[in-house]
Image (spheres, rainbow, N blue to C red):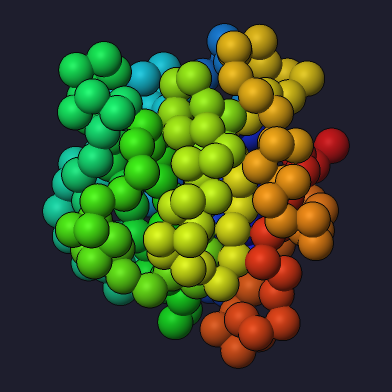
Amino acid sequence: MIIQWLGHACFAIQLQTGTTIITDPFDQSIGYPLPNLAADYITISHQHYDHNAVKTILGEPVIIEKEGQYNFTEVNIVGIPSFHDSDGGKKRGKNIIYIIEAEDLRLCHLGDLGHVLTLEQVKAIGDIDVLFVPVGGYFTIDHNQAAKIVEQLGPKCVIPMHYKTEYIDFPISGADEFLRHYPGYEKTQAFSITGKDLDLIPKVVLLELKK
C-alpha cells in the first residue's frame, strides 16, 4: 500500500488494487490545499470541521463514523472508543480510534486522542504495524504523551500528525519536539509499505505534502 499525508490528520491509504481509504478529511478553512482525490472509504474520528469534511472528497465512499467493526472485501475497520481530552470527554467530547486491516498490515489512526491509552484500549488495539499519532498538543496529546503511546503499542512504524505547519494557525506545536524522541526519523512525500518489508522500514516517518 501507499500512504500519503494530505495535511493535519488526513491521510490517503491506497491499496495495490487502487482501493483508497481516507482518514479525517478537513474543510477549506483549515489552510491546507484540499485534496483532489476520490475514496472508497472514509473514517471520521469525531465531528469537528477539521476532521469530518466528507464533501471535499470525490467519489461515493462508505462513511465510517461510529465505533464497531466493519468488514469489507479488501479491508476491515474497527472503531474503538476514546476521548478528545483527558477529562473523559467533558471538554471536547468523544474520539474514535480506528484500526485498518488490509494487505496483511494493521494500521492504527488515533484521531484527536486527548489522553494516554488505558490497558483496555491497548489490548483492544493489539499489535500495530503503522501508527498515526497526533503530536501537537493543546487539542490532543502532546509530544511526550505521544511517545508514551508509542511505547504502549510498540508499532513497527510511527507517522506523526496533527501538528503546527506553515499552512495552519492553530495554537499547537510543530513536529520537532516529537521528532527529538526519534533522531533517526526519515522524511518522504509518499510511503510505500508491504507486509514483507516491515523489518526494513524506519521507526518514524515524517510525511511531507506533495507539491
Residue plotted at (55% across, 41% down): 144
Most extreme residue toward the bottom is 196
37 sits to left or right of 20: right
147 sits to left or right of 63: right
Residue plotted at (73% across, 24% down): 165
Q: How many badges with numbers are in the image? A: 0
User: Would you say residue 118 is visible in this rendering?
Assistant: yes
Vertical position of residue 104 compared to residue 42: above or below: below
The location of residue 180, given as percent across then percent down, is: 74, 46
Quadrant in which the C terminus is drawn: top right
Most extreme residue toward the left is 68
Quadrant in which the N terminus is drawn: bottom right
Camera-side residue of 151 and 131:
151
User: Would you say residue 21 is visible in this rendering?
Assistant: no
Camera-side residue of 105 and 139:
139
The location of residue 50, given as percent across then percent down, is: 47, 21
Vertical position of residue 21 compared to residue 81: above or below: below
Residue plotted at (41% across, 61% down): 152
Residue plotted at (40% across, 46% down): 110
The location of residue 166, given as percent across then percent down, is: 78, 20
The location of residue 60, given as percent across then percent down, is: 38, 43
80 sits to left or right of 175: left
Camera-side residue of 44 and 121:
121
Vertical position of residue 19 compared to residue 94: above or below: below
Camera-side residue of 193 and 57:
193
Vertical position of residue 126 compared to residue 204: above or below: below
